[in-house]
Image (cartoon, helix red, strand yellow):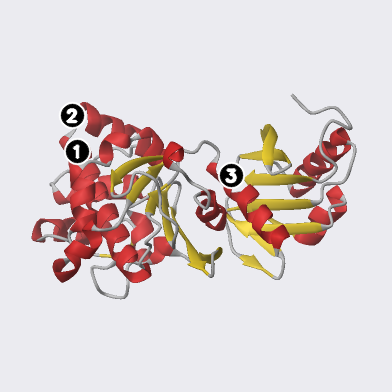
Amino acid sequence: MAQPAGAVHEHWNLVADIGGTNTRLGVVSNGALTDLRKLPTGTLPDLLEAFHRLRDEIGTDPQAVVAAGAGPVKNGTIRLTNAHLDLSETELAKATGAQHTFVINDFTAAAWSVAEATIADVAVLQGAASPPAGTRLVVGPGTGLGVGALIYSEGRYHTVSGEGGHVGLSPRHRDEVDVFDAARHIAPGCFFADSLVLEAEMFLSGTGLPILYQAVAMASGQSDTPPRTAKDILQAARDEVDEVAARTARMFTAHLGALMGDMAVTLMPVGGVFLVGGVAEKNRWLFGDTFRDAFNEGGRFSDLRRSMSLYVSEQAEFGIVGANNFCKNALMR
């Protein structure tokens, strides 16, 4: 329920996690989330009206507003690719009266979501029971493949954003060559020139799993496989009722683990490597020995990879948590 006027601390903040279909708005008082709303994203006027309406309901201007969403940020405006609209910090200020407004990428928020992670917020796949202080890597296979990082320097975290889903993915074994070759017929524009290297997101995401499934089917000699959703594919693999789905899940797991291990060696995240998001949360069975072995298999650097802490984040509403942590850090600056 909404807090009645005057019940919220004078210095409250508004945080948002904006998706293509739904938006979550959080009221933060004294650093803690006190109210959470879910509403349709709609058009830009709809969204701004929702911000304005919540401000009026509370009865005072928020000190700060942070809005996170999928898309690039430039000159104080985020292009929300899933919602098909542009949102600026200036528009947020007009809608809410806030002194400070910020628009951030969803994986900037995802990275910030683990800034204060403790033993209660994670499931341990390997390493320290409680995430140690230090640089942290966050990877989330969702609709796309998101990657974010917190760089730990001089006792503080700083965000590094990128496009991790667009790094190259290539066959790990000879029997995967036909799968990557088949994928050329499905997503030809996502290959790197005339190589067998594919954008990672085209296999390792909710959007990519159906492409991987179709490619596996084609490589197995099945030309008329009906399309399936990522959810259906993973359920069929878990139920062991579809061998194509089972192979798809194995490839997804191994390639995701290997990619995360490669990124970890590049970044050296002594504070831990974190899986976040719905795919990890709803399909924990995927992230067992096969995933961990692929993460750790790094040739001469296998021992280094084994020394890294690896977690599944169990925080609900990690986008809201991350936006709040970002907000606290920004206001301290």
For label 3, the residue is 321
Q: CA distance from mark 3 to mark 1?
A: 34 Å
Up the image or down, 190 lies above or below 327; here it is below
Q: Position of residue 34 (x, y in %)?
A: 70, 33
Mark 1: amino acid: Ala
Q: Position of residue 67 (x, y in %)?
A: 68, 51
Label 2 sits on a secondary structure element that is loop
Q: Is residue 217 visible?
A: no
Near mark 3 (Cα within 10 A), the count class, few <14, some 14-19 or many ≥20, is: many
Q: CA distance from mark 3 to mark 2?
A: 36 Å
The answer to which of 186 and 111 lies nearer the viewer is: 111
Q: CA distance from mark 2 to mark 1?
A: 7 Å
Using the image, tell me which numbered label, if any, was put on residue 246.
1
Q: Earlier in the sequence, mark 3 or mark 1?
A: 1
Near mark 1 (Cα within 10 A), the count class, few <14, some 14-19 or many ≥20, is: many
**Left or right of 205 on screen, residue 56:** right
Residue displayed at 84% across by 57% down: 99
The answer to which of 254 and 27 lies nearer the viewer is: 27
Residue closest to the far top: 1
- Is there a contact, CB below 8 Å, between mark 2 and mark 1? yes
Residue displayed at 44% across by 52% down: 144
Mark 2: amino acid: Glu
Label 3 sits on a secondary structure element that is helix
Q: Position of residue 187 (x, y in %)?
A: 34, 59
For label 2, the residue is 240
